[in-house]
Image (cartoon, rainbow, N blue to C red):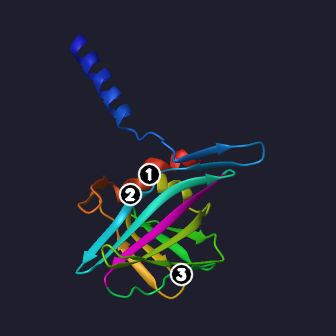
């Protein structure tokens, strides 16, 4: 009986230890504003020839409003076209349980910025956008992994299939993109 109780206690501690902690890159609070920002997490990586694309997510809470920040980083020896997020841009998330969740853009317009890495001879484009969660099916995001994500940019729509485990050899990181919202949404509520 003692062994059974010890085993149950050990399992309970093990399960609680596996819950993700909320570690913030930014945590500021004044009399009139508050801001909490989680670190960027790699959600998608595509490397093809001389071109690579990375998509990062970061959850944040700005004055009590949970939001999702996305950052698209593209590198190529060739020219990279401009991507923009407009006021009517959306992120549509399909969960593994079949539910569809839509996030709405908070920006009037944001376009990717072009820089040049002379050392590596790469063009680099970075696009950052912010999206609001809607109240419809918000709770579903905490209960089911993401299977597919569609970002509606100003001029095109791109679909991303999110992996359970993403081991980036380029960035030397490991992430769980399909479970990101399930694990960290609690940190910005």
Crowd class of label 1 (few under 14; some 14 to 19; many from 20; radius 10 Å): some
Question: Farthest residue in the front direction?
Answer: 119
Label 1 secondary element: helix
Pick the residue in front: 161 or 45.
45
Residue 90 visible here: yes
Residue 126 or 5: which is nearer the viewer? 126
102 vs 34, left or right, is left
Query: Residue sitting at 64 percent across and 44 percent down?
Result: 28
Q: Is residue 50 above or below residue 23?
A: below
Please report contact status of discs 2 and 1: CB closer than 8 Å, yes or no: yes
Say what secondary structure mark 2 lies in: loop
Give the image location of residue 35, x and y in percent.
64, 49
Residue under pointer 2: 145
Q: Residue furthest right?
A: 32
* Most common SS among magenta residues: strand
| Mark 3 surroundings within 10 Å by alpha-carbon count, few (fewer than 14), some (14 through 19), many (20 or more) | many
Q: Earlier in the sequence, mark 2 or mark 1?
A: 2
The numbered mark at residue 13 is none
Q: Magenta stretch: give its range.
A: 65-77
What's the mark number on residue 84?
A: 3
Rounded to the nearest angstrom, the CA distance separating label 3 from label 1 is: 28 Å
- Image quadrant where residue 145 sits: bottom left
* 73 inside magenta stretch: yes
Query: As displayed, is residue 50 above or below residue 139?
Result: below
Q: Identify the image quadrant of the N terminus.
A: top left
Residue 97: percent from left, percent from top = 39, 61
Q: Earlier in the sequence, mark 3 or mark 1?
A: 3
């Amino acid at each position: 009986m003692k062994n059974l109780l010890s085993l149950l206690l050990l399992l309970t501690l093990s399960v609680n230890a596996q819950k993700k902690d909320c570690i913030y890159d930014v945590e500021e609070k004044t009399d009139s504003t508050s801001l909490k920002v989680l670190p960027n997490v790699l959600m998608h990586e595509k490397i093809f020839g001389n071109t690579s694309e990375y998509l990062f997510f970061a959850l944040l809470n700005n004055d009590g409003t949970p939001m999702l920040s996305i950052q698209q980083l593209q590198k190529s020896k060739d020219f990279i076209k401009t991507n923009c997020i407009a006021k009517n841009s959306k992120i549509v998330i399909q969960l593994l349980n079949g539910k569809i969740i839509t996030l709405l853009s908070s920006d009037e317009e944001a376009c990717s910025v072009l820089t040049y890495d002379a050392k590596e001879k790469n063009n680099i484009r970075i696009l950052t956008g912010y999206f609001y969660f809607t109240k419809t099916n918000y709770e579903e995001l905490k209960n089911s992994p993401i299977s597919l994500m569609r970002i509606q940019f100003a001029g095109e729509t791109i679909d991303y299939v999110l992996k359970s485990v993403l081991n980036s050899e380029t960035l030397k990181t490991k992430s769980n993109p399909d479970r990101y919202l399930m694990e960290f949404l609690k940190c910005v509520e």
